[in-house]
Image (cartoon, helix red, strand yellow):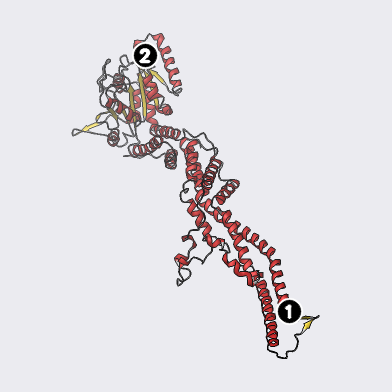
Amino acid sequence: MTTHRDGPLDHKLAALETAARLGEGRLSEEALATARHVVERAGERRRLSADHTVVGFFGATGSGKSSLFNAVTGHPLARAAATRPTTSEPLAAVWGAEGSEPLLDWLEVSHRHQLDGPAAGAEPSGPWSRLLRQRWGRPRERQGGRTTSRQGDQPGGLILLDLPDFDSIAVRHREIVTRLAGQVDVLVWVVDPQKYADAALHREFLEPLAAHRGVTLVVLNQIDRLAEADVETVTASLQGILAQDGLARVPVYPASASTGAGLEPLRSAIAEVAARRSAVSERLLSDVRTAARALGAGDAGGVPAGVGTGDEARLVDALTEAAGVNTVVRAVQRSYRLEGGRRTGWPLIRWATRLRQDPLRRLGLRRGDDPRRGMNRAPGTATDDPRLHRSSLPERSPAQRAQADGALRAFAEATGAGAPDTWRSSIRRAARSHANTLPDELDQAITSTDLAAGKGSWWWHVVNLLQWLALVAVLAGLAWLGVLALAGYLQFEVPPAPDVEGFPIPTLLVFGGLAFGLLLALLMAPLVRLGARNRARRARRRLRAAVSAVARQRVAEPVTEEIERYGAFREALAAASGRH
């Protein structure tokens, strides 16, 4: 068994297989199945004898196909009749039988005849006989009842197949013809002057196989029934119809099986095709191109716009809003102001702020405040991972959910613009591939973001110290005045309190401490608000970055991968169809 390798064919088959794999789930299953079948069939055919060329004779009932087959082979092998189909099984005439058995088994042809040349009575000196001797060696010798051949006598082989009529009323006959039309290397279509324009032949066979014109021959048989002047007219008419089928360059051979007219040019054409040993590759290349065109039937050649910076920014903006980031940012700002007021306000009235719950704690975004995490658990354990917790953000409103869905659709439409409809649909599916888990992942991104909750500003400590010093001054002044009052009440002689510009120091301590503490609290309030806005801006940037990471991983990257898959599909399709 000889295996022939053709570099371009190998490349195109690999490209077709790649295109079919990339198109899975995106293109029609019929087109994908056809492509996979072509690759599989090509592999099987190339594993078999590449030294044999298989030529199939196809025709309708009454076209004289079997008679022509007998005339071309020079042997009465096929049973012929003009009024009804007589061929029920494929019949093979084989020249150069060595290595042909596995090939014929694959073709499912059981009726086989091994031939060495034309039968007795056939013209021995014509080009058919000469080409047979040149191509398939000298006559074989009989030794001990076995047919043998000398080394070098059989450089290759030819297999002619007589097939059932394609218009037979027997379903099995039609199935055989359809199967072998996809397997033989060269297709010879036999028509007669009465039915050469038959719609079934052209619509169901010739048009679908127009890509195989390089391995197609057409025989206008029974020209003996035409006047000599009409042969050229009918031949021209047939060529015009073939041109409409996409077979403009396919040769037409007028012939007559009964008179032998036109047989030598037909034999020469078949022998020439077989001698080139390229029919197998040409046929398979045609199959590949046909399958590639079917895969690219809905491809208008457009290039998707791809993921642009603006597209991703708009997506992140919409998901940021839908994820409730604005709510979290406002909570960060209020939390900072509340904590800042507690740390910089007058200590004696700070208790009032304790009655207000921290907004971040209410949302479950203040780390270390969840009592369920346990008091005795060591830090750094698995349950300390913020990704394992959920926030207490309000449930997404219908408007927020619609906003997120709309953002995904808009992103898919913008990035997939220009792609064929089938691939735009796959890009939309890629954009929504994580739509069900996206809300949870956004929530985890928020809870995992360090919002600096509980972290104050450095100047809080200075202000807090001053406030407590002011409070100590007030308490010291009150204590001093209390001691003086108690001593006077008990009739003790107590020296007067020292004063400053006529104001007793204890009194100055009380009123000065109160005034300083309250004034300091008032002065710090604007700074606390300014710090709250700065903290909120930083929190927004961090939250947006977290949302952007989720959007990129769960939306942008799947879409980019799908667009890259389409690009690879187009390259493979172009390679398979021969566009580069």
Residue at left offset 39%, top offset 22%:
203
- Lower position in the chain sequence, tag 2 or tag 1: 2
Depth check: give the residue in front, 538 or 59: 538
Q: Furthest-right residue in view? A: 501
- In the image, residue 332 sits, relative to residue 185, either above or below, namely below
In the image, residue 318 sits, relative to residue 274, either above or below, namely: below
What's the amino acid at mark 2? Pro
Q: Amino acid at mark 1?
A: Thr
Quarter of the figure that contains the N terminus: top left
Report the residue marked by disc 2.
193
Q: Can residue 455 be seen from the camera position used here?
A: no
Q: Answer left or right for 347 relative to 171.
A: right
Separation (CA) of disc 2 from disc 1: 132 Å
The residue pinned by badge 1 equals 507
Quadrant position of residue 208: top left
Mark 1 packing: few (<14 Cα in 10 Å), some, or many (20+)? some
- Looking at the image, can residue 559 be seen? yes
Does 159 sit above or below residue 253?
A: below
Q: Tally the numbered discs.
A: 2
